[in-house]
Amino acid sequence: MPLRIGDAFSGYRVLRLLGSGGMGEVYLVQHPRLPRQEALKVLRPEFSHDKSFRDRFIREADLASGLRHPHIVGIHDRGEHDGLLWIAMDYIEGTDLGQLLDGRYQQGLPVGHVLTVITAVASALDYAHKKGLLHRDVKPANILVADLDTDDPKIFLADFGIARPLDETAGITTTNMTVGTVAYAAPEQLMGEPMSGCADQYALAATTYHLLTGSHLFPNSNPAVVISRHLNTPPPFLAAVRPELASVDPVVSTALAKSPDDRFGCTSDFARSLVKAADRTTVGHAGAATVLAPATRKTPDPDSSATRKDSASSDTRTRWLVGGSFAAVLLLLACIGVFWQPWQQPELNGATSRSAEPATSAPTSTAVAPLPAPTSAAPWPQSTVGAPTVTVTARPTTPADVGFSASEQEFLNAVASLNAANGYTSAPTYLRAIGGGAASKDQQDHALVQRGYQLCAALDDGLDSSAARQRVLEPFNDHSVDMFDYYGAIVIGYATHRLCPQHSDKTGQI
């Protein structure tokens, strides 16, 4: 039950609700001893009572509390009250950029404003990266601003509470897709690859595009389509929307490179190159006039850190097209009847919710909660084709008394990330069902690998009929489990990418 105005909570006095989201509520509170107000995030019971989540929350709050930067929302304290975990942080009396995009700046912010914001946030990210932390959820709603139209704007990057140590991001088990918002997430984050500060740089570049145009980088209500475009589609031209920003296109495209190796060396390098390129349009300050430039893509200066390998080179393109099997399988499901509901992201910020979200709070912003796991979508079409019994000769399945191959273990590690601690509350039930109700984890793992190879064998047989496509879906299809369509799509993506990535060349037939 939400707290009420005047309630006491762990010594704090509740002044008002700032926002509500999937993980809990954020309140404006009076500090019990000091004459100041803070923002208090209180987690919901289902998270507070989960031991794995509790341990992670405490560890990450401790890590984030060590950040001291003029553009990072500071964390002051954490604790537990009546069985609920809480964290106290700076209260920023302002709004977030997501609110500005939906209200005052629906066609994009003035270029000068964007340059100021991106420079500040890039500085904050580089500072955190040097401290060994990734943010992993950079987006307009997590950037709080005040006095943006003045000579002394206040800019803060919020919600470092879901940050991760850099040395703990090697793999999907520490890269929860429900945390990073899909609209801004880097390809390596979506694929569960090892992550570096380049992932935050990509998200900041996607945020830059949104701030300059008023539109998402890859606008679509279907997350599967958005994921696929992040993995395989070149970023759209800024100049197509704002012709005067043609000189900025190469810089933003560099930061949005599919491969982290092709991006800038650090996030501040991206910001500096952005400012330099924007200066060519005579943008001198917030709201300054601009000079129209031809709507053609330009090449970064040879002496600029924006210079990089051609993002369309065959090796990079091949890498991400193969990796794109994850998105391609999701799109397969959409094509044959899996209709994802447009994701609605309740933000723990304090302003009126954006048009695609329910209004939950008063007009003030604070830290933002992670994206909750998607709600149940329409079910897959009921199959009339029985689950195939396949004898795989090209890739033999692993007997129960033999260890897993490297690719099989990668697949199982990815599947293991679908757990309640990462926000996938229904996943264990689904995995037990498709694992045949195995009594032990080892038996379940072997059943999952077997089903993965059944999927690969079905792909070997081709996709020339609806029955063939059903056989591709069938190994991970269990209609008895809530959200089977969502988890099935993810696991099919994992299996295809890890066990038979050669089938990425068949996705065009689906």
Image: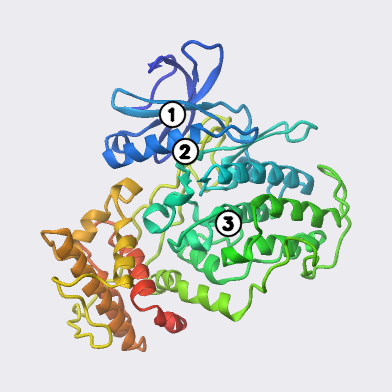
Residue underneath mark 1: 87
Find numbered disc 2 in the image and state the secondary structure of the residue it sits on. Answer: helix
Residue 493, horizontal then vertical, whole percent: 37, 69
Residue 443 image-quadrant placement: bottom left
Does any portion of residue 326 appear in the rendered image? yes
Q: Amino acid at mark 3?
A: Cys
Disc 2 or disc 3, which is closer to the eye?
3
Residue underneath mark 3: 198
In front of the other: 136 or 371:
136
Q: Amino acid at mark 1?
A: Ile
**Are the residues tagged 1 and 2 within 8 Å (C-beta)?**
yes
Residue at the image point whose x is 56% and y is 26% from the top:
91
Residue 127 image-quadrant placement: top right
Find numbered disc 3 in the image and state the secondary structure of the residue it sits on. Answer: helix
Disc on the earlier residue, 1 or 2:
1
Quadrant in the picture for the C terminus? bottom left
Residue underneath mark 2: 161
**Are the residues tagged 1 and 3 within 8 Å (C-beta)?**
no
